[in-house]
Image (spheres, grey):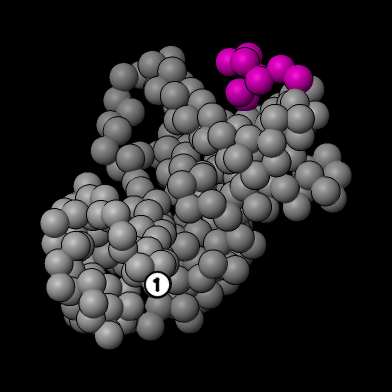
Amino acid sequence: GSENLGSENLGSENLGSDYLDSGEIFDFDDMDALGVLPDGVPDEIKAVYSKLVEKIEERKAVMKRDWTDTQFQGGFANNQVVLKTYEKGLAKELLSSLQRIEGGSKLAEITGGDIGSSSLDLFGGNGLLLKLQENTHRMDIAAKVLRRPKTLGHSLDLVGAYLKNYMIDKADAIMQTILPICKQKGGLWEIKALNFYAAIRAKQSRYSDSLTFLQDLLSVITIGEDEEGAWEIYDM
């Protein structure tokens, strides 16, 4: 907590490398463990702290997989209701990110001024994803929004939920948008995206394309299945 952060460790010359290179200093699954920095902390320590928070948020986002904990065993109609909550969660995250990056006026322009619950659809003629791809400028905005870890994590989680419900076209639509971003970010983002897209292409009976994605996946995995921490990659 903040007590530890205010201790003599803050004066360590190796603070940056100690905090950022070791996942054992804090529990990366518990953001509350970081606490709040006390008053009077030097700017360089604040910068390290901010970077640490970013890394933790990024890790939590890429490891998000709520879809695996949702059973989807209530029948088609009930499953569609559950999926709608996933879609609305991503749409709200997209709108929140747009608001933060572009401001209210740009958000109103993109959504046609209506940002109520009726406008939170992702697909279709009035869908948010289509609106973000109507012109080059908006596609640039979409890229900025989707690069945010929380938004990208929501996107991949929704892809998993779609796959679990055999809604392959919707999963494909999202992956077409976010695959380039996941590749740019690399690491677990790229691994997770390639894994999902290989599954999508296989379910579309596009087996050659699926094999290509699997080969790309193997080329970016640099850790052996028996190495420490490998379970996080092979159990995503």
Left or right: 129 as drawn, with respect to 76 = right
Q: Secondary structure at mark 1?
A: helix
Q: In the picture provided, is 91 more to the left or to the right than 144? A: left
Identify the residue at the far right of this view.
Answer: 135
**Which residue is label 1 attached to?**
44
Q: Nearer the viewer, residue 19 or 184?
A: 19
Check disc 1: other Cα within 10 Å, few if <14, some if 14-19, many if 20+: few
Magenta-span inclusion, residue 206: no
- Identity, as a three-letter code, of the amino acid under mark 1: Glu
Where residue 116 appears, x then y in whole percent? 62, 15
Q: Residue 109 at x, y = what percent?
A: 80, 29
Quarter of the rendering occupied by the N terminus: bottom left
Query: Is residue 114 found inside the magenta-colored segment of the image?
Result: yes
Q: Residue at x 14, y 62 (%)?
A: 4
The segment highlighted magenta reads 113-121
Can you say which quadrant of the picture contains the C terminus?
bottom left
Residue 193 seen by the camera? yes
The residue under the point 32% across, 74% down is 20
